Image (cartoon, rainbow, N blue to C red):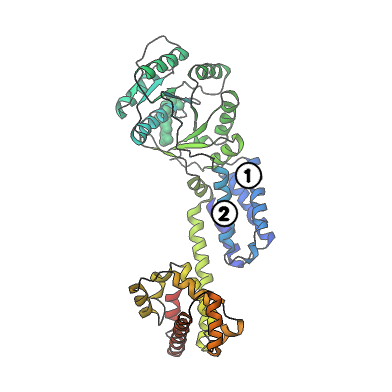
Amino acid sequence: LSERLSGVFDRLTKQGALSEDDVKTALREVRVALLEADVSLPVARDFVKKVQEQATGQAVTKSVTPGQQVVKIVHDALVDTLTGEEDPGELKIDNPPAPILMVGLQGGGKTTTTAKLAKRLKEKNGKRVLMASLDVYRPAAQDQLAVLGTQIGVDTLPIVKGQSPVDIAKRAKQQATMGGYDVYMLDTAGRLSIDEELMAEVEAVRDVANPRETLLVVDGLTGQDAVHTAENFEERIGISGVVLTRMDGDGRGGAALSMRAVTGKPIRFVGLGEKMDAVEEFHPERIAGRILGMGDIVSLVEKAQETIEAEQAERMMKRFQKGRFNMNDLKMQLEQMLKMGGMEGMMGMMPGMGKMAKQAQAAGVDDSILKRQIALIQSMTKLERANPQILQASRKKRIAKGAGLEVSELNKLLKMHRQMADMMKKMGKGGMMKQAMKAMF
Ligand code: GDP
Ligand code: MG
């Protein structure tokens, strides 16, 4: 998947600029990649359409790094689609005891997730939690939750044989109220597939408990099946969010995108293993990265950027060797410095500016000096920028006034420019230029 995308973006970055056709071609590949990541066809189609609209609106052809722009547009659109309105990790647990209903198919990870979230509520939120297993079908199911409860130090509702799930839910509510618990969690029984009996039972429990949160737990590895399950539960029971388990496996994350797009329900947590700590709130960026194979692409983009910067440096170097270093060049450098971490990081690297950087630092000057210098250059006419030697008193006054600064500050800038220009000329002759330029970019 990431290989395919890298290939596409590689071709794009080599072209230097993106045409609308290029965007289309790239997005065709993105669509295939999404399908391979297990995103459903209609979702992939819609997604690509949305990105295409966004990309076309932007000045892609003018981009210095077109590959980066496409990656960013695709990535941002993924994050956008995956992001809900509320904080996914914030469970609604006001008005104690707050009921949380856990639903899903058998083996999806309900019981495990119930315990994981109980532990999280206890440790992160400082809540008193009561867990109850409503699984009266599998012989060891209620014991399984009790064992986990002991392990994490969270109370479980005492097991009473022969009760129905609804009876247990009522008892849990009672016990939670009397025992002064903040939250009680109801771990329902699953089935191998969705059937009427299961839905009716969960519905009855829901009506008794009136849950603040109904979390659907689904196996993230099951892809489209998980989405189908979510649709069914949402329609019949109504869910407040989804927990995707087994995201520690090699699942490609596409289910998350489909899940969100199809059901409109937020993904709240992801399960990342069998251990009790292996749960975290959902981070859209991580899934987006996983779907895109972002690691590869980011390094690719960096490489592309280096190439472009090297080319730019080469061009500037040629000008400097010819003794040309005007105010436009200086402005470009100042802007570059601002972009690359400002004064502290860059000044020391620039020829002739090391001393000034130290002085500036000693005087407590920050990046605002860069901004003021840029403002001064912006206040110059084209002619003045190209030929700073023509600046006489009246011109200087006008320029300083235009930038809202003192003439003395402009004089400092001009002195700095002269020093730098001298330095560059000398180095141009001595062949040190290349090294200096490398240090600069
Ligand atoms: P339930 O039938 O829905 O209650 O599912 P369980 O909670 O009993 O989990 C079924 C199996 O999946 C157990 O062996 C769990 O340890 C395992 N499991 C649950 N969540 C995860 C997860 O996020 N990652 C991994 N690798 N295994 C999980
Ligand atoms: Mg279970």
| Three-letter residue code for mark 2 | Arg
Q: Could you tell me which residue is drawn at 49 percent across and 56 percent down?
A: 296
- Locate residue 311 relative to residue 119 in the image: left or right: right
Q: How far across and down, in percent of the image, does residue 389 sit?
A: 53, 90
Q: Nearer the viewer, residue 400 or 192?
A: 400
Label 1 or label 2, whichever comes before in sequence order: 2
Structural distance between the alpha carbons of marks 1 and 2: 16 Å
Ligand 1 under 8 Å from disc 1 Cβ: no
Q: Could you tell me which residue is drawn at 44 percent across and 27 percent down?
A: 110
Name the secondary structure under disc 1.
helix
Image depth: mark 1 or mark 2 in front: 1
Q: Could you tell me which residue is drawn at 52 percent across and 34 percent down?
A: 222
Q: Is residue 315 visible?
A: no
Residue 48 vertical placement versus 167 (above, below) = below
Q: Nearer the viewer, residue 395 or 95?
A: 395
- Locate residue 145 relative to residue 290 in the image: left or right: left
Q: Quadrant of ligand 1?
A: top left
Q: Residues within 10 Å of mark 2 (few under 14, many from 20)?
A: some
Q: How far across and down, in percent of the image, does residue 368 sit?
A: 45, 69
Residue beneath disc 1: 44
- Locate residue 44 relative to residue 434 in the image: left or right: right
Q: Is residue 410 visible?
A: yes
Residue 440 vertical placement versus 77 (above, below) = below
Q: Residues within 10 Å of mark 1 (few under 14, many from 20)?
A: many
| Three-letter residue code for mark 1 | Ala
Name the secondary structure under disc 2.
helix
Residue beneath disc 2: 4
Residue 11, image quadrant: bottom right
For residue 103, the mark is none
Residue 122 vertical placement versus 33 (above, below) = above
Residue 279, image quadrant: top left
